[in-house]
Amino acid sequence: MSQDDTPKPEFAATPADQQPLRPARPCPNCGKMSVADSYPFCSKRCRMVDLNRWLTGAYAIPVVEDDQDDDEV
Ligand SMILES: [Zn+2]
């Protein structure tokens, strides 16, 4: 018998749970608070923007990815 095997239906990922040790710091791209998922950026989109900036060597047009994780709490 293993009743503990049951997966939790909806696991609400709390910000505190996603930030183990790193302190929240402003996103280098837009200045929003970063999240652990895309640290040190506030979102994957900003990370892509920064990456694109490095690749092109200049300020490029922000790439708009499918940003599912809404960083506006
Ligand atoms: Zn950002």
Image (cartoon, rainbow, N blue to C red):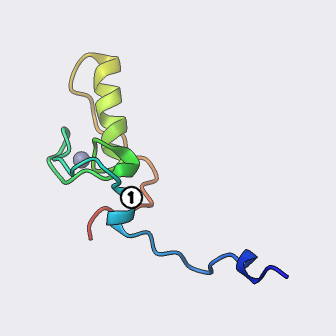
Task: Report x, y in % for residue 55.
Answer: 35, 19
Q: Which corner quadrant of the image does residue 58 belong to?
A: top left
Residue at screen point 45% across, 60% down: 68
Residue placed furthest toward the right:
1
Please state which of residues 53 and 27 is positioned toward the viewer in this rendering.
Answer: 27
56 is higher (above) or lower (below) than 3: above
Tag 1 residue: 18
The amino acid pointed to by label 1 is Gln
- Is the residue 51 above or below the residue 31 in the image? above
Neighbour tally class for label 1: few under 14, some 14-19, many 20 plus, Cα within 10 Å: few
Return the x and y of residue 23 as percentages of the image width and height.
21, 50
Does 47 sit above or below residue 67? above
Q: In which quarter of the view is residue 51 placed?
A: top left
Res 52 → quadrant: top left
Q: Quadrant of the C terminus?
A: bottom left
Q: Position of residue 56 (x, y in %)?
A: 31, 18
Instruction: Work out which residue is located at the far front of the displayed protein and give it.
Output: 1
Please give left or right for residue 59 compared with residue 7 in the image.
left
In the displayed structure image, the side of residue 63 where residue 59 appears, left or right: left
Residue at horizontal 18 percent and vertical 47 percent from the top:
25
In the rendered view, tell whether residue 22 sits above or below residue 69: above
Q: Secondary structure at mark 1?
A: helix
Residue at 74% from the left image edge and 75% from the top image edge = 5
Residue 8 percent coordinates (x, y): 62, 78
